[in-house]
Amino acid sequence: MHRNIDYGWIDVITSGSMYAGKTTELIRRIRTFILARRTAVVFQPSVARRYTEGEEVVSHDGLRLQARYVDNPNEILWYAETHRPDVIGIDEVQFFDDGLVEVVQELANRGHYVIAAGLSITSEGKPFGCMPQLLAIADNITNVYGVCVVCGEPATKAFALRPKTAVVEIGADDKYEARCRRCWLEGRRARGEAV
Ligand SMILES: [Zn+2]
């Protein structure tokens, strides 16, 4: 978004729906900084590992960037203290607890440019993990949209194809689909689920 990154900054890329291009946008922005000869690193929560056993972040359309997996957001802080990267990307932030919000705030206060990407709501329509707090402290927010697989309108929701059995179900392609609010509501009502 801007290149004067000598002071801290918090970019948040978010969507209510998966397959909206959050990770694609995150990778694109990180690459721009790398081209500008800035040092950058990308983190993901270990729970969100997908498509690969290797240490990389992969978008649904196949873009890749090397990434580090962490279980605890404080590991990001420790890494930053040692390596001092200019830019820090964090993907799938919704799987972190509110501890991540303090970490992101601290990173920005120390002068890092933070780009965080994640889902804003669960497939049940509830705020997802630390995302509400993260949106509140962001300097810039980019909302991206999927395409409703039922009607083709912009998708702002993730529809669970089967009723949920676990609190955290990682987005395997066969478990969720992108839907607009109307088609999400109709699908949940048809199963007698709360909306
Ligand atoms: Zn729709």
Image: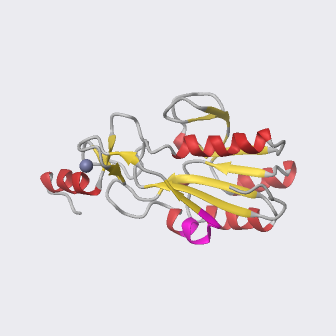
Left or right: where 145 falls relative to 177? right
Q: Is residue 126 found inside the magenta-colored segment of the image?
A: no
Principal secondary structure, stretch drawn in magenta = helix
Q: Position of residue 66 (x, y in %)?
A: 69, 34
> Considering depth in this image, is 33 or 79 the residue closer to the camera?
33
Q: Is residue 136 found inside the magenta-colored segment of the image?
A: yes
User: Bounds of the magenta span?
Assistant: 133-140
Q: Is residue 95 visible?
A: no
* Residue at image location 76% in from the left, 45% down from the top: 33
Q: Position of residue 190 (x, y in %)?
A: 13, 52
Q: Position of residue 81 (x, y in %)?
A: 84, 55
Q: Position of residue 124 (x, y in %)?
A: 31, 57
Assign the C terminus to one quadrant of the image. Answer: bottom left
Left or right: where 81 falls relative to 106? right
> Considering depth in this image, is 144 or 46 the residue closer to the camera?
144
Assign the N terminus to one quadrant of the image. Answer: bottom right
Vertical position of residue 94 compared to residue 41: above or below? below
Residue 37 image-quadrant placement: top right
* Residue at image location 50% in from the left, 67% down from the top: 132
